[in-house]
Amino acid sequence: MDNLLEYNNKVSLIYGNPGKINQETESLSHHEFVARTSSFLGKDYDSKKLQQVEDLEALMRFQHEQLCRRSDAGDLSASEFTRNFATILQSIYSVIEVILGEEDFLTLYGSKPKIAAEFILETSLATTESTDNGRASD
């Protein structure tokens, strides 16, 4: 079975059977993480590495939430938010790449850390800089 199809099937089961799992965000994130990693890296992949990766992804979600709060409070312009998140993503993805190795990182995430961050910057900054409501662009 194709990895993406397998992942989609597993995620459908997670959301299709809400009684089987805790509906809290972290529980859903964990189940999605397990579905994604088992689909792309195999169900017998090194559990210690996977725990480290899952913890780093949780840290990235937390840092993203912090950026959202700062943005909502008016402390960050849209372009500042985008730049900060791209930096966080590249930093955390770089650590994950060391943990998994380059080949497994590419299998799981589909691109190198720097390319993912550059993609966010390229696709978001053109839009966000125009919505900064008169704040000066960096």
Image (tube, rainbow, N blue to C red):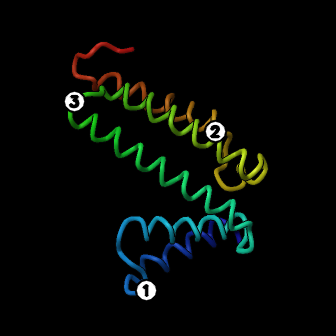
Q: Secondary structure at mark 1?
A: helix
CA gap, disc 3 to disc 1? 40 Å
- The crowding category of the residue bearing disc 3, from other C-alpha atoms within 10 Å (few below 14, some 14 to 19, many at least 20), is few
Q: Residue at x 49, y 75 (%)?
A: 12
Q: Mark 1 or mark 3, which is nearer the start of the sequence? A: 1
Q: Is residue 116 left or right of residue 137?
A: right
Image position, residue 66 (x, y; %): 34, 42
Q: Which residue is labeled 1 in the image?
A: 20
Q: Secondary structure at mark 2?
A: helix
Q: Mark 3 or mark 2, which is nearer the start of the sequence? A: 3
Q: Which residue is labeled 2 in the image?
A: 113
Q: Dots 3 and 1: beta carbons under 8 Å?
A: no
Vertical side of 4 occupied by 66: above or below: above
Q: Is residue 15 left or right of residue 4?
A: left
Q: Mark 2 or mark 1, which is nearer the start of the sequence? A: 1
Vertical side of 19 occupied by 33: above or below: above
Vertical side of 33 occupied by 137: above or below: above
CA gap, disc 2 to disc 3? 28 Å
Q: Which residue is labeled 3 in the image?
A: 74
Amino acid type at image mark 3: Gly
Amino acid type at image mark 1: Lys
